[in-house]
Amino acid sequence: MGGCATVVLTSRDEARAQAAADKLPRVGAAKHYGAALNQIALNDVPDRFAAAVNRAGMIDILVNNAHERTIDDWKTVTPEDFSRDLNNCAAFFLLARLFREHVVARKASGSVINVGSMYGLVGSYPPVYEGIMAASPVSYHATKGAVVHLTRHLAVYWAKDAVRVNCLCPGPFPFPDGNPEMIRRLSDRVPMGRIGQAWEVKGAAAFLASNASSYVTGQMLVVDGGWTAW
């Protein structure tokens, strides 16, 4: 990742993706693009990935970040909705495989950053949610746990292909305008005594994307204020 990286942002709405891309800073010859992608529509993923490659010319870094969320907890989630949530991980895999094929065909190197969660490493913390909202969705935890092990699996198979695969696992990063009581409870649970700020994830992502992490693969980089250290 150089100082003039070109970025392709995706959204189910291409106009929305392009509007976000237009707000990104541009350095040197960098150009930023928006592209349409609904990762839950698994059969469309190959064509959507090809369109992104065509737009950018080539892709050296893949950030698997999209997640179609469910609000149903273990009491109410249906088998169908649980399985649909797991499709988020399936999409991560399909995009990563397409990316690997693209990199290998170019005889280049690449970095995959799967965005997981601290909840892919540890169980939920029920006292945070009690009396405020339903429990943290069980299918979300299952999906993020799957992303963590998908990362390890692909890393060992693709290391010889010069494709690194790592997982960025954020901790408590609720929206600033979220429920104040929940934010207080989360902050009390974190050793650092506060929730995370969005910019605090950026450095970790830049590290995994750049040559600064050239000997790092199959790892979980946890940005959680110490939550998982308890």
Image (cartoon, rainbow, N blue to C red):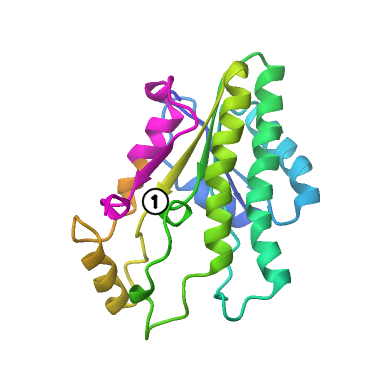
Q: Nearer the viewer, residue 188 or 202?
A: 188
Q: Position of residue 203 (x, y in %)?
A: 33, 38
- The x and y percentages for residue 153 are 60, 34
Magenta-colored span: 203-230
The vertical placement of 177 against 204, above or below, is: below
Q: Is residue 136 above or below residue 134?
A: above
Residue at 64 percent of width and 62 percent of height:
85
Q: Secondary structure at mark 1?
A: strand
Amino acid type, callout 1 = Pro
Q: Is residue 210 magenta?
A: yes
Q: Which quadrant, please, contains the N terminus? A: top left
* Left or right: 100 in relation to 182: right
Assess disc 1: are there few (<14), some (14-19) or many (≥20) residues with their C-alpha within 10 Å of its C-alpha: many
Q: Is residue 17 above or below residue 154?
A: below
Q: Is residue 20 visible?
A: yes
Residue farthest toward the right in the current orientation of the protein: 43
Instruction: From this view, report whether residue 111 is shown above or below residue 142.
Output: above
Residue at image coords 75%, 55%: 41
- Which residue bears the numbered disc 1? 170
Of the 4 image quadrants, the one containing the C terminus is bottom left
Residue lying at the far top in this picture: please name it.
107
